[in-house]
Image: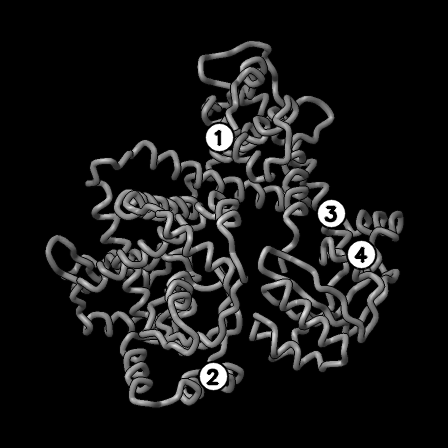
Amino acid sequence: MRFPYFVLFCLFLMSLQACRVSEKPEVETKNEQGPDGIVARVGDFTISDDHYRNALLRFYYRTGQAVNLNPEVRRTVVDSRIDRYTTVTYAMKNGWHVEPEARYRWDRIERKVNMEEFERLFIHENVSVSEQDLRILFDRLNTTLRASHLFFQSRAMADSAYARLNQGESFSDLAREVFRNPALAENGGDIGYFTVDDMDIAFEDQAYQLEIGQISEPVKTSRGYSIIKVTDRISTPMLTETQFANTRNRIFPLALDQKKELATRNHMNAILGSFEWDRNVIASLWNQFIDNRDQLVTDFPANEILLSLMHNDRDQRRIIDQDDYVLSENVFWRELYYTPSINKKGITSEDQFFQLVEGIAYRTYALGLLKHHRDYDENRVQKIIDETFYDYLLGRFDEYLDQKVTLTEQLLESEFYQNKDLYMDPLELNLSEIIVTTEQEAEKAWKKLNSGADFHEVLKQYTVDRQSIEYNGELGFIPIHQFGTMAPALTGIQPGQYAGPFQISSHRFIIFLCNGRREARMVSFEEAAPRVKEYLHSNAKKRLRSEILEKAKKDFNAHVYVDRLLSLPIEL
């Protein structure tokens, strides 16, 4: 479930302000302009005018342009940057940046950042958004589709199914054959209603080009291949030029992102399609992968099997060998090691394994080209890698604090018995939900429910989450506060009653049925102990963080040039 934006905004403000909690000033201030172009220092790090200005603007736009950039806000933002670089310096002083896992993370980050740079220089710089693109997206944003699909792991399987459809076999019959999921098998592959940004970009782009009843050729998605059949289309009536003009600038970033993603997919598919693959070598790699799967899907550390495959100096068979590009066995195993485990653990078939090989081939091909590009800026890329790696060090510091905090049983009991009311079990509700994409659909569903229609039948007819039909949309028991701004309206709901419709995003409306409720109640120490421990641990961790950073800022000579900070012009 998505919570309203202003709730996230408040949480963000609270987390940022938390950086400044202290009984006394943590950072020395100097009422001077300081060195030209610098607003603050800590250790070997400087926070430049541009760095600070960008951080302040990111904060401003992330909060919905709802804050006044007054001196207090300016100081809060610069303090958060000083906290960041103090933590990084502290981590480096402890040698965390050269630990084996840190070096592994660095290598992964380096690959990721350089791939993003490849996309920017070789693909995205040629992408532009036309007036027609904006009008198409505007129309799609005001249109909800319903579709069925057939999913396959390989192009050969998808092509075979498409040929059978063209020979007269029914979509529903093939769905029963293709899907193991009972619901998809029985409903003809129906995935319900969706709109822009709900589906894989290639799937979405193709679906919006289809008419009702039309069936697409196989579409390559991030997971495999889909054949799509559009079964319904709901469009907002009477869209006007004024409406388009009012949303034009707002939808431009989405249009650009979508075109970039499609351009990247097309580029990758074209490159991969040009390769000549040695299928015998790939079959051999697949067998080795399956034989050692549990070891090979891990992230860190490398095991002996993978190390031997990565560093084998014998003559290596080649997966690809054409023109100036070669992908050998040991390079594949090395890059497999740096591939996130989430991309490896789900591989259970040779077709899925080949997609993994494709991904590694594209990455190594792209990185081989990148540094020869005339506009490749090594210094710029290095700064991005550094900043991304610093995030890892911040996480390492957080783990260090967790290990340093110790709590006794006596302390837990004392806290509980002094503040028992704080550890009550809250009201919990077991609700079923119907999610729809338009206010009109929500009103139709609401009227049917209140006229006595069966909830499950209304759910089947209207919900955009087709999987929820299997469990009647039931969410299980959830504490009342997790419903955000809907909580006050739900507090008094009783079993059998409905609530809603609530708007939870621009294209999502929700209706609830109450299945049950658990009233708030007092609990025993044994029941509350985990919550008490979490609360005390969090407070102790905050105090320890503050103590360490306060001392570190003095040790690393952290200071802010206040006059320069406050006089720096900011253009919104």
Closest to the camera, between mark 1 and mark 2, is 2
Q: Which residue is mark 4?
A: 488
Q: Which residue is mark 1?
A: 54
Q: Is residue 247 visible?
A: yes
Q: Is residue 295 visible?
A: no
Contact check, label 1 and label 4, Cβ < 8 Å: no
Cα distance in 3D space between marks 1 and 3: 41 Å
Question: In the rendered image, which quarter is residue 98 located in?
Answer: top left
Cα distance in 3D space between marks 4 and 2: 40 Å
Q: Which residue type does callout 2 highlight?
A: Gly
Q: In the visual, does 23 lie left or right of 185?
A: right
Please tell me how crowded label 1 is: few (under 14), some (14-19), or many (20+) other residues with Cα within 10 Å: few
Cα distance in 3D space between marks 1 and 2: 50 Å
SS at mark 4 in the image: helix
- Which label's residue is closer to the chain start, 1 or 4? 1
Q: In the visual, does 314 lie left or right of 288?
A: left
SS at mark 3 in the image: loop
Closest to the camera, between mark 3 and mark 2, is 2
- Which label's residue is closer to the chain start, 3 or 4? 3
Cα distance in 3D space between marks 3 and 2: 56 Å
Cα distance in 3D space between marks 1 and 4: 38 Å
148 or 344: nearer the viewer: 148
Point out which mark residue 163 bears: none
Point out which mark residue 407 bears: 3
Q: Which residue type does callout 3 highlight?
A: Leu
